[in-house]
Image: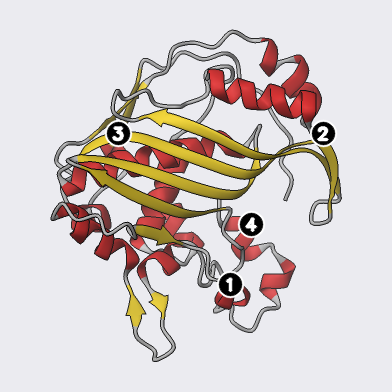
């Protein structure tokens, strides 16, 4: 919480106003932010200075790991974040690659599980990483990337958090996640939950111990209509201690994540929080 609040305060104090063409709103913006999450000691980075919701974030992560490409698939596992991008984005609705209602195209998990080669064959990035880490192998290229510029026109959205690099030191697994853009009041806690959970899950299914997760954000911003709530409300609150994330120990393989795992296999304990804050969302 201290590093989260420090980033928010940094944006308030030192941010530069930038006009965002997509939303038509101004953003108070800083470049380069680094956060660290203590997965080894299970300090789950769920925001406590307002009530925050974690289930949709983990559901979305599961969809990515399964390679989902349809908003209906995400809804079925408890995540509604892709409904608008799949069905209300006019540019995507006009795109000849769109297959129909709820189709998302070749975004996020599709790239992670079915990266298209020029000869028509595919690369399963995630399976290669899991296989290597299970064998204790780190070839300094255990990289899961969703960022494929050659196929941006074949999906409804460019990825924001786009690359996850795993590093193995002995039997301790580390993660470095890179994000190009972040709506700090609304989106950051969603992303924090996913970075933490990704390392915890990958360590568990590869038989390693989790270490630290490092989260690098390039463009961190607060929208103009969010600023009063952040400055005058959330930043005045005293944070509580971090809760813990409990993951079903029966999850031991990538196949488990692909087939039977649900949100019932995750539990957050010890979560104390302040009242919710209804930040405006910019589409």
- Label 3, label 4: how many angstroms apart (C-alpha)? 35 Å
* 183, 139: nearer the viewer: 139
- Label 2, label 4: how many angstroms apart (C-alpha)? 21 Å
- Label 3, label 2: how many angstroms apart (C-alpha)? 37 Å
Q: Does 187 sit left or right of 57 as displayed?
A: right
Q: Which numbered disc, 1 or 3, marks the residue closer to the eye?
A: 3
x then y, percent, for residue 69 = 46, 67
Confirm or deny contact between disc 4 and disc 1 (CB under 8 A). Answer: no
The disc, 1 or 2, on the residue closer to the chain's N-terminal end is 1
Mark 1, Cα crowd under 10 Å, few <14 / some 14-19 / many 20+, is few
- Label 4, label 1: how many angstroms apart (C-alpha)? 22 Å
Q: Is residue 78 visible?
A: no
* 119, 85: nearer the viewer: 119
Mark 3, Cα crowd under 10 Å, few <14 / some 14-19 / many 20+, is many
Q: Does 28 sit left or right of 43 as displayed?
A: right
From what the image shows, is residue 57 above or below residue 225? below
Q: Secondary structure at mark 1?
A: helix
From what the image shows, is residue 280 above or below residue 44? below
Q: Secondary structure at mark 4?
A: helix
The disc, 3 or 2, on the residue closer to the chain's N-terminal end is 3
The disc, 4 or 1, on the residue closer to the chain's N-terminal end is 4
From what the image shows, is residue 41 above or below residue 106? above
Q: Which residue is mark 4?
A: 84
Q: Which residue is mark 1?
A: 149
Confirm or deny contact between disc 1 and disc 3 (CB under 8 A). Answer: no
Q: Is residue 220 visible?
A: yes
For the point 45% across and 27% down, the residue is: 45
Q: Which residue is mark 2?
A: 225
x then y, percent, for residue 283 = 72, 51
| Residue 211 marker | 3
The disc, 3 or 4, on the residue closer to the chain's N-terminal end is 4
Q: Which numbered disc, 4 or 1, marks the residue closer to the eye?
A: 1
């Amino acid at each position: 919480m201290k590093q989260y609040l420090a980033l928010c305060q940094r944006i308030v104090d030192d941010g530069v106003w930038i006009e965002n063409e997509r939303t038509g709103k101004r953003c108070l913006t800083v470049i380069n932010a680094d956060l660290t999450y203590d997965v080894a000691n299970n300090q789950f980075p769920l925001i406590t200075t307002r009530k925050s919701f974690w289930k949709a974030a983990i559901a979305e992560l599961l969809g990515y790991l399964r390679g989902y490409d349809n908003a209906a698939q995400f809804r079925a596992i408890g995540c509604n974040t892709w409904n608008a991008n799949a069905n209300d984005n006019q540019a995507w609705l006009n795109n000849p690659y769109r297959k129909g209602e709820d189709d998302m195209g070749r975004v996020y998990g599709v790239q992670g599980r079915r990266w298209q080669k020029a000869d028509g064959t595919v690369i399963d990035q995630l399976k290669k990483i899991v296989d290597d880490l299970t064998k204790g192998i780190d070839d300094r290229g255990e990289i899961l990337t969703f960022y494929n510029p050659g196929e941006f026109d074949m999906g409804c959205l460019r990825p924001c958090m786009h690359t996850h690099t795993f590093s193995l030191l002995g039997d301790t697994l580390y993660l470095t996640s890179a994000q190009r853009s972040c709506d700090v009041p609304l989106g950051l806690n969603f992303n924090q939950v996913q970075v933490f959970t990704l390392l915890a899950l990958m360590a568990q299914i590869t038989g390693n111990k989790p270490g630290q997760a490092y989260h690098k954000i390039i463009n961190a911003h607060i929208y103009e209509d969010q600023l009063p709530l952040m400055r005058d409300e959330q930043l005045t609150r005293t944070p509580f201690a971090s809760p813990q994330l409990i993951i079903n120990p029966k999850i031991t393989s990538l196949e488990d994540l692909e087939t039977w795992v649900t949100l019932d296999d995750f539990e957050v304990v010890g979560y104390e929080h302040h009242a919710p804050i209804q930040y405006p969302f910019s589409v």
